[in-house]
Image (tube, rainbow, N blue to C red):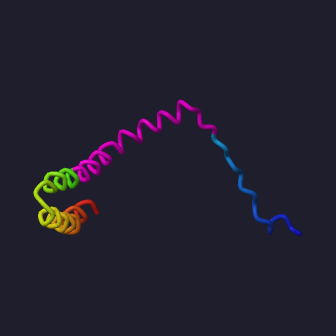
């Protein structure tokens, strides 16, 4: 066989990641992700708190709130987050 027809071997470069480098990257990523986590948790807690408050009023009220929350998620929060 001719050598020029054979596919060339790709050299694999292995990088050693130290613990300090890993923690530094994790710190940078955490600073970027923290606002997104805070928004997601606050949106969830807003729904939970309103369910708890209305839950004391009765079964009809909590079922109405459940429908309103679903409607708000579809029409309000989903287009804003997409």
Judge by depth and name the residue closer to the eye, 66 or 72. Answer: 66
Q: Position of residue 35 (x, y in %)?
A: 29, 44
Say whether residue 43 is magenta: yes
Judge by depth and name the residue closer to the eye, 31 or 76. Answer: 76
Q: Position of residue 52 (x, y in %)?
A: 18, 52
Please report the bounds of the magenta region as a residue range.
16-45
Q: Residue at x 13, y 66 (%)?
A: 60
Left or right of 6? Residue 18 is left
- Whether 62 is drawn above or below 27: the answer is below
Q: Position of residue 31 (x, y in %)?
A: 36, 39
Q: Position of residue 77 (x, y in %)?
A: 22, 61
How many numbered discs sit on the rendered protein? 0
Judge by depth and name the residue closer to the eye, 52 or 5. Answer: 52
Q: Residue at x 89, y 69 (%)?
A: 1
Left or right of 3? Residue 70 is left
Q: Residue at x 26, y 60 (%)?
A: 81
Judge by depth and name the residue closer to the eye, 2 or 39. Answer: 39
- Whether 11 is drawn above or below 60: the answer is above
Q: Residue at x 19, y 63 (%)?
A: 69
């Amino acid at each position: 066989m001719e050598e020029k027809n054979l596919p060339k071997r790709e050299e694999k470069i292995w990088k050693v990641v130290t613990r300090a480098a890993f923690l530094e990257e994790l710190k940078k990523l955490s600073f970027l992700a923290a606002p997104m986590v805070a928004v997601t948790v606050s949106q969830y807690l807003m729904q939970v708190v309103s369910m708890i408050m209305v839950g004391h009023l009765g079964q009809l009220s909590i079922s109405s709130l459940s429908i309103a929350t679903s409607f708000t998620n579809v029409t309000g929060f989903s287009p804003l987050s997409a």
